[in-house]
Image (cartoon, rainbow, N blue to C red):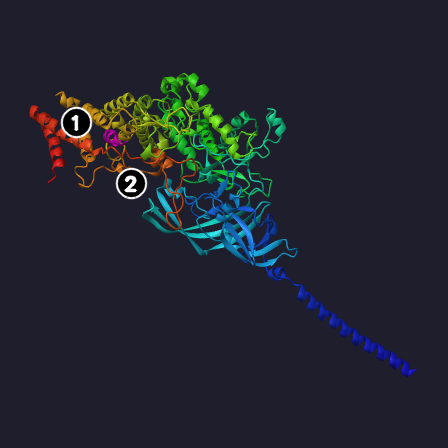
Amino acid sequence: MKKGIYLLFLSFFLFGICTQVDAKRKKETSKETKKATETAYDKLFRGKKYTTAEGLMKIHNMQGKIWVEFPVALLDRDMALTSSIRTISDNGEGVVGQFAGRPMHLRFTRQDSLLQARFLLFNIPVNTGKEVKANQALVESNLPGIFKSFKIKAYTPDSTAIVVDMTDLFLEHSYYTNPFAGYAGNSFFGFVARTHKFQGDRSSVSGIKAYDDNVVVMCNMGYDVDHLVFGAFLMKKDVPVSVNVDKMLSLLPEEPMRPRMADSRIGVAYTGKTDYTGGSEGFKPMYYTKRWRIEPSDEIKYRNGELVEPKKPIVFYIDTLMPAFWKPYIKAGVEEWNKAFEKIGFKNVLRVKDFPADDPTFDANNINYNTIRYAPLWMYFIQNSMFTDPRTGEILQASMYIHDNVVIGLHEDRLITTMAADPSVRTFDPTPELDGEALRLKVMQIVGKCLGLTENMGATAAYPTDSLRSASFTQKYGLSPSIMDYFMFNYVAQPEDVEKGVRLTTTGIGAYDYYAIQWLYKPIYEAATPKDEEPVLDQWIREHQDDPMYRFGIRQASYASYDPTSLYADLGDDPVKGLIYTVNNLKTSLQNVFTWYGGDKDRSMTKRRSMYSGLTSAFRTKLDYVFAYIGGMYLTDKRAGDTKPSYQPVPKAKQKEIVKYLVDLSRDLSWLDNEAVLKEFEIGDRIASKNEEEIIYGLLDRIRFIALSAERGGDYTPEEYVNDIYNIIWAPTMKNQKLTNKDMKLQSAFLMGIITTSTVNMSPAVFDVPREAFRLADFEDLSVRSMYQHNFALLENAKFPVGPMKEGMMIAGEKEGFGMVDYIEAKPYSTTHLFYNMLLKTKDMLAQAVNRSTGEAKSYYQLLLFKVEKALDPK
């Protein structure tokens, strides 16, 4: 019995030991199995703190490093890398919400153990010919270059995504990923270049976001910024700037939009490409328009002529920070363009909404939203940006940035332009509707740019100047056939015209704008390719080529303004009449401005001084419109078969009329100096005297345009031109008449001008006076606001190089249009000899005048003769 119990106990004991050994063995085996099955993906994230965002791809922010699970399915898909400002320490470098630069076109490829981000050139050749065999050669010759490489650290457990550290793609700075716009507050209209020096030790990742078609990495980035005037003279050095930037990697549309070929005869923005047609034509430039993908939601109804909504409307979201008073006028300015889309069968294309307060997923910085942002800054105009598909020109996103001073500037311009004719603006507190209407028109112009249109500087010349004084005409047609001519107010209207109901602002979009939207957006179903569309597009242009209402005038640089009918913010077809009406209004305004705007609201007189300066500047601007006709040429972008010539000089009779008018005008500008007002100013030069001299110098400066016009078939020669000026100015002396003080001032200014222009007092190697010798701007005493008033046409149209002049340097660049006509020399003419001969002729005339004169007149002529002789023989 005892033996049985002992054996039973021993059995249980041994069984327990075996069980423990077996359990231990199983546990060790389990550990070994677990260790063997743990993947590189598991090791990467196990035990570490990180945040995750999941959308287009899954991204992780792990201790300042950006780990991306890049889907294998997205390899070789077209993407874009771009940046937007979320916050910034100096909004003169860029404003919140602003998209800078061009999107970087990328494709990701896998090469062994690397994920490569490859950069595609913007102008990759497109084979539009019939040589299919050339496709492979074109592809092999234009492979995307490697921008960044990332070592593959792991694959996701299901092997559908590649895991890489992609920090270097987002937390870095290059020309293409620069978050700062070249055209910003601190660039002062492009006169100041800025060098942004990235400081990696002051930069870090601050957050991540992900959406269905893009991922966002928020980066705090530090920079030291240098400011260089004209890109050469150091103004500020190492200014610290901190900016929180959203770096966005976006998936481009899987099915690219069919491009539409651009045409320089109509004002459309474009993206440049290279066209390969094969055969003898080879490679040549090609341009795609920038436009939205506007497609009918119901194609059958659309083809049957019914109004339909687009599949995807263009929705702009207005900033919650936007002043409430501005919002209805902004909305009206945006939606005005729906009228043009309705003409081609689309309704409700453009819509305006507030930032949604009840949508937690809404992010104004998300590239999927078009926004209208409030941007507190000194700038006096509205900025805009567009994000386009680099493959096709499709506009994927557009935004506007409205600065504080926009409405202030419009308000002051309205007062300066219309105070003489419109009693309702003779107060510091006009009705809000006046400012609102001006804002509506300005927004309308910027929306036109966001739709892919460019400025049309030739539109206003379609209307007769006197028609702008007609109530019935202006009520029906407005002030211009296009809102894109960037005019604002009717400076032609006289007080009696306003009493009869003439419009002082335009009505809305005009005939050209309807035509431009049709040309850019109307579907051409019968065409299978962009090339097939061209005959139809060409026909639409030819249908209107002889109608000035549909004329497109390209913007011009101030130093190369050849076409007098294509100028910034001019009105009407007769600049002399326009200047006469302007002078009538200015005389009234200058005499009354201090009375109309007096009182306690301007005790410092700052506003009235600014307005007085603005009034005299308005005279200078309108004067430039008249000068442009001297040696001017009407320019037309011509194609084979078009009816109008490429250029046509202004008739001689018109030019001679203007020369006489300008000289006569310069004899008495005393009305510019209101003595009762000027004594309230700081002491300075007489405004009248400066402008009288400017007219003479302006006449002499136009000799280069006269020479070019004559070379190209004009019948007004430089010899005849200088003789006309000579005979008009010296007429009192040659007729032995008694000179007035005005005559003496005019003759003295003219004499100094021809001495300078003849180059007799320069080095013998100088045969032509540099074009910069006349009318150079003196910026030392100009405020930012007065620079805007005096020179906005020059500043807006100045042609600066795109991109950095050296590493990191940003300067304002051309964004759209087919480019301005550059400076052209008239080769057969060296004009200095004309002024030298005139100087010799003047010497003989003055010698005769000295002999036959007495008293003060004799002393005056002796002084002039001395100056001539001194110039001819400076020893």
Q: Does residue 748 appear left or right of residue 611 in this picture?
A: left
Residue of label 2: 780
Residue placed farthest to the bottom in the image? 3
Callout 1 secondary element: helix
The picture places residue 173, in percent across and down from the top left corner, at 45, 52
Calculate the distance from the C-alpha at mark 1 to the C-alpha at mark 2: 30 Å
Q: Residue 735: which quarter of the image?
A: top left
**The residue under label 1 is which amino acid type?**
Met
Chain-order first, disc 1 or disc 2: 1
Q: Is residue 691 magenta?
A: yes
Q: Tell me the chief SS of the magenta region.
A: helix
* Residue 336 visible in this rendered orientation of the protein: no
The picture places residue 617, in percent across and down from the top left corner, at 31, 31
* Residue 728 visible in this rendered orientation of the protein: yes
- Front residue of 751 and 62: 751
- Front residue of 223 and 833: 833
The picture places residue 366, in percent across and down from the top left corner, at 54, 43
- Identify the magenta region: 689-704
Q: Is residue 304 magenta?
A: no
Q: Quadrant of the N terminus?
A: bottom right
Residue of label 1: 744
Q: Quadrant of the C terminus?
A: top left
**The residue under label 2 is which amino acid type?**
Glu
For discs 1 and 2, the disc positioned in front in the rendered view: 1
Callout 2 secondary element: loop
Q: Does residue 235 appear left or right of residue 312 in this picture?
A: left
Q: Does residue 202 appear left or right of residue 71 in this picture?
A: left
The picture places residue 82, in percent across and down from the top left corner, at 50, 46
Residue placed farthest to the front in the image? 279
